[in-house]
Image: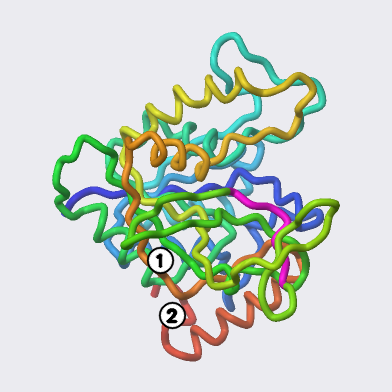
């Protein structure tokens, strides 16, 4: 069996979730967190290694809550995302408190990954089907076109909105099953039975709730990390003085590769998503897992 890795981005501070670390909040009947279900689904689909991207100061809590358990069932590595892990010649701007986004998160895995991998958010549930489709694409033989051969799981925007506030999503344009454009879009809210995005002067502009979005579930190859590394330096050169919130994000990196003809991204559509953006979202996630267990999708004791 080809080796493939699951990379989980869990270094986020949980800024929209109040005081707790939202990635470590229990949602299952026996204290399972969302990551437990993602890892279960990934291993079932054929992935055989897990890389956790975390903050160094969370390492002890993280290992106690999930890491030590997962080490008993599969190969585990840890990568550490840090605000001051920057290329030579750059320093952290005064006043910046958070790391540099999902691009920097994945870059922290350089040296740990020699196999194709899927990257996911720690606080999103993607469903079994998504892991199977991405895994099968990563292990398949593809014609050598001289381009990166990536894939992503595409979800319907309307299924990924929160009742409790605005969300950020990578809104995608898809043609013949392949991604042509992805734009990271913030401030998306539920609106009159659909979705809306911020317009001029904070006016809401109705959006297409049936459009595809990326939920940061990308099927990638280890060579991609070289692109991310060189791109990070270019990104930092372009950060304006005083900008303490600029982020180096995966959708932007991948969109750049698409626009320059250096990559193709197959879009595998997946139906099921839920996640915890706001504290108030948690109960609906707990209820969703209860239903999945009642429907026989998962055992009550997940890894039994």
- Name the spot of residue 186 as percent of width and height, x first: 69, 52
Magenta region, residue range = 184-190
Report the side of 287 relative to 19 (left or right): left
Q: Magenta stretch: residue 185 in it?
A: yes
| Residue 107 vertical placement versus 51 (above, below) | above
Q: Nearer the viewer, residue 6 or 151?
A: 151
How packed is label 1: few (under 14 Cα within 10 Å), some, or many (20 or more)? some
User: Where is residue 202, by image quadrant?
Assistant: bottom right
Report the side of 89 relative to 180 (left or right): right
- Name the spot of residue 131 as percent of width and height, x first: 36, 64
Disc 2 designates what residue? 298
User: Which quadrant would the N terminus be assigned to in this image?
Assistant: bottom left
User: Which quadrant would the C terminus be assigned to in this image?
Assistant: bottom left
- Name the spot of residue 49 as percent of width and height, x first: 34, 49
Q: Nearer the viewer, residue 7 or 236?
A: 236
Do callouts 2 and 1 mark residues in contact (Cβ within 8 Å)? yes
């Amino acid at each position: 069996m080809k080796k493939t890795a699951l990379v989980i981005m869990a270094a986020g501070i949980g800024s929209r979730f109040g005081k707790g670390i939202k990635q470590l909040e229990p949602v299952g009947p026996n204290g399972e967190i969302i990551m437990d279900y993602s890892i279960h689904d990934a291993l079932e689909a054929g992935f055989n290694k897990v890389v956790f991207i975390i903050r160094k100061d969370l390492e002890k809590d993280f290992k106690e809550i999930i890491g030590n358990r997962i080490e008993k069932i599969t190969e585990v590595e840890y990568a550490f995302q840090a605000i001051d892990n920057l290329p030579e010649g750059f320093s952290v701007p005064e006043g910046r408190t958070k790391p540099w986004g999902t691009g920097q998160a994945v870059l922290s895995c350089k040296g740990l990954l020699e196999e194709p991998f899927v990257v996911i958010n720690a606080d999103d549930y993607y469903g079994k089907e998504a892991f199977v489709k991405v895994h099968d694409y990563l292990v398949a033989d593809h014609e050598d076109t001289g381009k990166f051969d990536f894939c992503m799981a595409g979800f319907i925007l309307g299924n990924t909105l929160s009742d409790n506030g605005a969300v950020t999503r990578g809104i995608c344009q898809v043609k013949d099953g392949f991604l042509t454009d992805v734009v990271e879009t913030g401030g998306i809210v539920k609106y009159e039975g659909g979705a809306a995005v911020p317009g001029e002067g904070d006016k809401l502009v109705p959006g297409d709730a049936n459009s595809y979005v990326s939920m940061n579930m990308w099927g990638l190859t280890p060579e991609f990390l070289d692109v991310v590394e060189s791109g990070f330096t270019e990104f930092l050169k372009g950060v304006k003085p005083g900008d303490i919130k600029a982020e180096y994000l995966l959708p932007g990196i991948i969109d750049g590769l698409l626009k320059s003809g250096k990559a193709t991204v197959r879009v595998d559509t997946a139906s099921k998503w839920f996640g915890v953006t706001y504290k108030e979202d948690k109960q609906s996630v707990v209820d969703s897992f209860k239903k999945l267990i009642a429907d026989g999708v998962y055992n009550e004791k997940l890894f039994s």
